[in-house]
Image: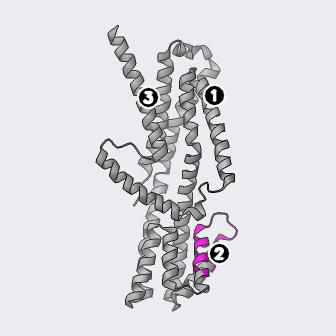
């Protein structure tokens, strides 16, 4: 009797602990650290991430308007209700269905984070095209100011009427500042701080240092451009190489759910013994948490930064 009671308490603790850590992953995008000192360093790194997001907020548009917030609330309500009913179908237990529905609170954040990652990739690719144009103009004998303007024109021709063009928007603002009398150095610094991306910072710093110390600007920009473009090319090759593994991780996540739903539809009585006691519902809930954790773990493993 005592052993059964202990087993029940341990099972509940494991379920609640797993659910709490899963919520932590959804909120912070990382696994919780166990040591207090490590957590403090992570907070310092998180501050830098917030600064970066603030710098990119102009073109990411992460829920600043009232219409966007209203849409977020509507999306949260729909997600919570949908996941609750899906949990009732999967667990046939109101408590676990309610816990599963809580995950719907983080759906807007997950969508925005995915959108943010997509825009970052677009930003990097557009920046590669922009600096290649700048390097070509400088090599032909143009000044940096003229090269920036030609880069904007070349990028505008390439992108046409595409909806997502963050780098072109930033270049237009940079050239507009220069046109209205802002010094080239100050305009480049504002451009660097607004984008706040590693490759952009490296490029702008190289240009500013070379101009201040009187070096060969065309040669320095050419070398910096080659380094940055090689890095971006390697990143794209890594994404292509890991595409199959990302798809496999998604299949491993959603295939068990598909099998369970197919069994429920074809032979409902086959799964009924699982729900005759709370143990079966608990195991189903634990399995669902493991599948969700598998999805995020698979994304973390296949996300390689250089």
**Mark nearer the N terminus (3 vs 2):** 3
State the residue position of label 1.
85
Q: Is residue 79 above or below residue 136?
A: above
Graded by Cα atoms within 10 Å as few (under 14), some (14 to 19) or many (20 or more), the crowding at tag 3 reads some
Q: Is residue 173 a member of the stretch shown in magenta? A: yes
Mark 3 touching mark 1, by CB under 8 A?
A: no
State the residue position of label 2.
156
Answer yes or no: is residue 225 visible.
Answer: no
Mark 1 secondary-structure assignment: helix
Task: Tell me where residue 137 appears, x and y as whole percent.
Answer: 53, 86
Graded by Cα atoms within 10 Å as few (under 14), some (14 to 19) or many (20 or more), the crowding at tag 2 reads some
Q: Nearer the viewer, mark 1 or mark 2?
A: 1
The reply, left or right, for residue 300 in relation to residue 98 is left
Q: Is residue 287 above or below residue 274?
A: below
The part of the chain drawn in magenta is 153-176
Tag of residue 222: none
The reply, left or right, for residue 157 in relation to residue 135 is right
The C terminus is located in which quarter?
A: bottom left
Label 3 vs label 2: CA separation?
52 Å
Q: Residue at x 45, y 37 (%)?
A: 22
Mark 2 secondary-structure assignment: helix
Q: Nearer the viewer, mark 3 or mark 2?
A: 3
Q: Residue at x 65, y 56 (%)?
A: 65
Q: Nearer the viewer, mark 3 or mark 1?
A: 3
Label 3 vs label 1: CA separation?
20 Å
């Amino acid at each position: 009797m005592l052993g059964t009671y202990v087993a029940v308490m341990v099972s509940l603790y494991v379920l609640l602990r797993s659910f709490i850590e899963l919520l932590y992953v959804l909120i912070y995008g990382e696994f919780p650290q166990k040591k207090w000192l490590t957590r403090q360093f992570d907070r310092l790194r998180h501050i830098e991430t917030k600064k970066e997001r603030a710098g990119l907020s102009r073109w990411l548009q992460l829920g600043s308007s009232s219409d966007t917030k209203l849409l977020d609330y509507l999306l949260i309500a729909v997600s919570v209700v949908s996941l609750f009913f899906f949990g009732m179908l999967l667990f046939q237990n109101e408590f676990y269905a309610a816990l599963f529905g809580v995950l719907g609170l983080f759906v807007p954040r997950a969508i925005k984070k995915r959108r943010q990652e997509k825009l970052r990739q677009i930003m990097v690719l557009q920046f590669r095209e922009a600096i290649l144009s700048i390097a070509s103009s400088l090599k032909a004998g143009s000044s940096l100011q003229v090269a920036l303007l030609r880069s904007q024109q070349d990028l505008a021709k390439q992108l046409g009427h595409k909806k997502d063009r963050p780098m072109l928007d930033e270049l237009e603002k940079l050239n507009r500042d220069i046109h209205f009398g802002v010094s080239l150095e100050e305009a480049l610094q504002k451009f660097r701080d607004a984008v706040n991306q590693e490759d952009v910072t490296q490029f702008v710093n190289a240009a500013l240092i070379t101009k201040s110390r009187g070096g060969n600007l065309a040669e320095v920009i050419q070398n910096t451009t080659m380094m940055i473009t090689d890095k971006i090319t390697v990143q794209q090759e890594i994404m292509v190489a890991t595409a199959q593994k990302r798809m496999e991780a998604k299949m491993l996540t959603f295939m068990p759910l598909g099998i369970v739903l197919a069994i429920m539809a074809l032979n409902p009585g086959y799964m009924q013994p699982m729900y005759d006691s709370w143990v079966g519902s608990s195991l189903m809930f634990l399995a669902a948490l493991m599948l969700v954790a598998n999805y995020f773990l698979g994304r973390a493993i296949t996300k390689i930064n250089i």
